[in-house]
């Protein structure tokens, strides 16, 4: 459901530079791939390391 909501917002032209989420959404490879394909940076906390993983959008 979150993937569909984010895609609808992006398709409607909502300006987005970054998407952050909890470890559940960060573990969804389809969500991450969708955002990376659109050039949206992401940041996800990791329960394993207590650190965040990030990707930077291509500018």
Image: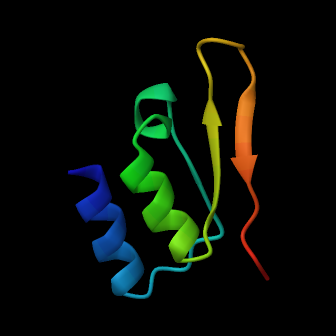
Q: Is residue 3 left or right of residue 51?
A: left
Establish if 6 lies above or below 20: below
- 19 versus 49 height, above or below: below
- In this orientation, which residue lies closer to the viewer: 6 or 39? 39
Look at the image and tell me in which quarter the C terminus lies.
bottom right
Quarter occupied by residue 51? top right
Q: Residue at x 59, y 14 (%)?
A: 47
Q: Is 7 left or right of 49, judged from the image as shown?
A: left
Name which residue lies at 52% across and 74% down: 37
The count of marks equals 0
Residue at 43% of width from left, 66% of height from top?
Answer: 34
Horizontal side of residue 29 vs 48, given as left or right: left
Tell me how the rendering is colored: rainbow
Q: As displayed, is residue 24 above or below residue 33?
A: above
Picture layout, residue 5 above or below residue 15: above
Residue 14, position as x, y percentages in the image: 46, 80
Residue 39 pos. (x, y %)? 62, 75
Residue 58, picture quadrant: bottom right
Residue 19, percent from left and from top: 56, 55
Which residue is at 63% across, 28% downward? 45
Q: Is residue 3 left or right of residue 18?
A: left
């Amino acid at each position: 459901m979150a993937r569909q909501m984010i895609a609808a917002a992006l398709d409607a032209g909502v300006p987005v530079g970054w998407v952050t989420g909890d470890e559940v959404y960060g573990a969804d490879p389809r969500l991450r791939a969708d955002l990376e394909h659109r050039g949206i940076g992401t940041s996800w906390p990791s329960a394993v390391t207590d650190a965040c993983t990030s990707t930077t959008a291509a500018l």
